[in-house]
Amino acid sequence: MDIIVCVKHVPETAEAELKIDATGKGIEKAGLVFDINEWDDYALEEAVRIKEKFGGTVTAITVGAEDSDSTLRKCLARGADKAIRLTDPKFIGSDAYATAKILYSVIKNMHFDLILTGAQAGDDGSAVVGPVLAELLGIPHATMVKKIEWGEGKAIVNRELEGGLEERLEVKLPALFTVQTGINEPRYVSIMGIRRAMQKEIKVMGLADIGLNENEVGEAGSWLFIEKLYVPPVEKQAEFLTGSPDEIASKIVEILKSRGLV
């Protein structure tokens, strides 16, 4: 089974202090640590497990700058056979739709039985690239997939719904699934895997190689663009009351009276 995994190189922001950059449309990236998008990590692991069970190949593909190679090297070290980086200054500013078009322009010429992506991106929260890519390719898709089973020419998937519910679907292959965290446990990268990954080629393609023009990518080819990025203003603050229990109770009553609540 030949599988394509779409991955993204994103900053780890959980414990970082973020600042808006000079353009007002992005964050300052100096000092941030970048790694594979969390949801894509599970998608990659699922692809490698499928290959180990059924044979075939795994190709990791990303749209990003040269520093995205570290994420692609991780994919190769974890079991991907090939890696493709789509890089061009004209790609900057591409929204999810334009990114899906860029991926489509390359993937449409590749053989695949399955495409896996993460359920969403950790940097912009988008969950759009996978479904749009599937529509462009004209193949069925399922989102928020938590389990995959296999039949003859088809997959049976469990997908997460709201309220703790799950939906079970039968999907004809080839298909695209966006993977939810928890579908598996991503493996650690071995030293031997890292050494082998460093020797493998990463294929680099630009705008001139994929059959699109500059009006189809970047902000010109996007449906959405960032107008302004800002930290939400603090509208309310907590007030801590001190004193004895009786004093605190009196203060609470006065506050309630001043606001017409008692």
Image (tube, rainbow, N blue to C red):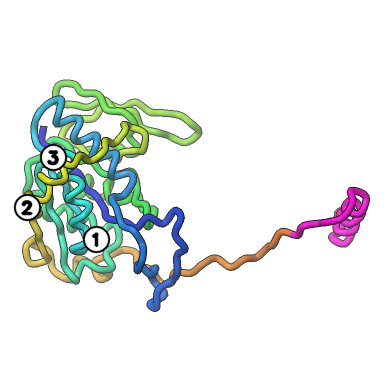
Q: Nearer the viewer, residue 245 or 118?
A: 245
Residue farthest bottom in this picture: 22
| Image point (6%, 52%), residue name | 201
Whole-percent x and y of residue 116? 23, 40
Q: Which residue is mark 1?
A: 98
Where is 37 relative to 182, above or below?
Answer: below
Say whether disc 3 or disc 1 marks the residue closer to the N-terminus.
3
**Highlighted magenta segment, given as a residue range:** 239-260
Q: The disc labelled 3 sits on which kind of residue?
A: Val
Which circle, 3 or 1, is nearer the viewer? 3
Q: Is residue 36 left or right of residue 233?
A: left
**Would residue 260 be visible to someone looking at this image?**
yes
| Image point (18%, 30%), residue name | 50
Whole-percent x and y of residue 200? 7, 49
Where is 68 relative to 166, above or below?
Answer: below
Q: Which residue is mark 3?
A: 58
Q: Is residue 49 magenta?
A: no
Distance between the alpha carbons at the discs numbered 2 and 1: 26 Å
